[in-house]
Image (cartoon, grey):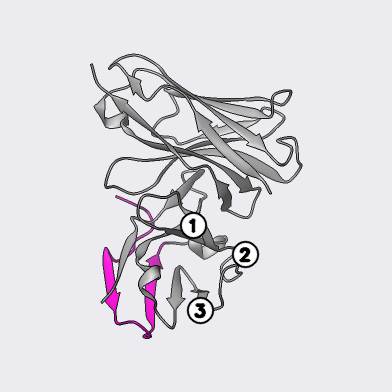
Amino acid sequence: QLQLQESGPGLVKPSETLSLTCTVSGGSISSTGYHWGWIRQPPGKGLEWLGNIYYTGSSNYNPSLTSRVTISVDTSKNQFSLILTSVTAADTAVYYCARRKTHLNWFDPWGQGTLVTVSS
Amino acid sequence: QSLLTQPPSVSAAPGQKVTISCSGSSSNIGNTYISWYQQLPGTAPKLLIYEDNKRPSGIPDRFSGSKSGTSATLGITGLQTGDEADYYCGSWDFTLSAEVFGGGTKLTVL
């Protein structure tokens, strides 16, 4: 079945750039009708959507983060990636990648998540 | 502040029924689908209900979803201790052009 796995550094220094990759297995990232998204969860808090991307490269972002977030897709590797610039301690969170059903507002499946800590 | 409002916590005894509400507006729930997610301690969220009231394969029929106007409800019957988790509603907001989630509800099975 479809599986997603996040990867990337677990520790990032303040003001630097957070970079994560989500690898999709058991299916193609180029499947029509699905977007691919990033969602994060600060420790002890709720879910915050960061952005989605379609395999064509078309993307949309959380308006509160749009100046700092970029999501890209590499169909040859069946991966999509997240870049978050100028990080602060407030960006410390578990970062999840997930598949989103286009126009129908649901995410499934989700990756297991990866904790990224922003600290010097 | 979340655009989707959920109670912070609910509780009930094993075997009982519980409902979790998610209140939004015409900018989100009132004009598009809602989904529900279960997050067991230390794990990733899992899709529980999609498109207002549909259950993915493998989700027992003890879980149900409904929607009326700008509010939605998740119902869980025959509560089990294994149902103790955080539950989140999610939708799309047309004003923000963004995915939105409720703040989450912690279910305690006493």
Secondary structure under the numbered disc 3 in the rendered image: loop
In percent of width and height, residue B91 lies at 50, 55
Q: Residue at left 34%, top 58%?
A: B104
Q: Residue at left 35%, top 55%?
A: B41
Q: Amino acid at mark 3?
A: Arg
- Residue B59 vertical position relative to residue B45 in the rendered view, above or below: below
* Labels 3 and 1: the sequence-earlier one: 1
Secondary structure under the numbered disc 2 in the rendered image: loop
Q: Which residue is mark 3?
A: B62
Q: Amino acid at mark 2?
A: Pro
The range drawn in magenta is B1-24
Q: Is residue B63 left or right of residue A74?
A: left
In whole angstroms, how far apart are the C-alphas of marks 2 and 3? 13 Å
| Mark 1 belongs to chain | B
Q: Which residue is mark 1?
A: B28
Q: Is residue B58 left or right of residue A51?
A: right
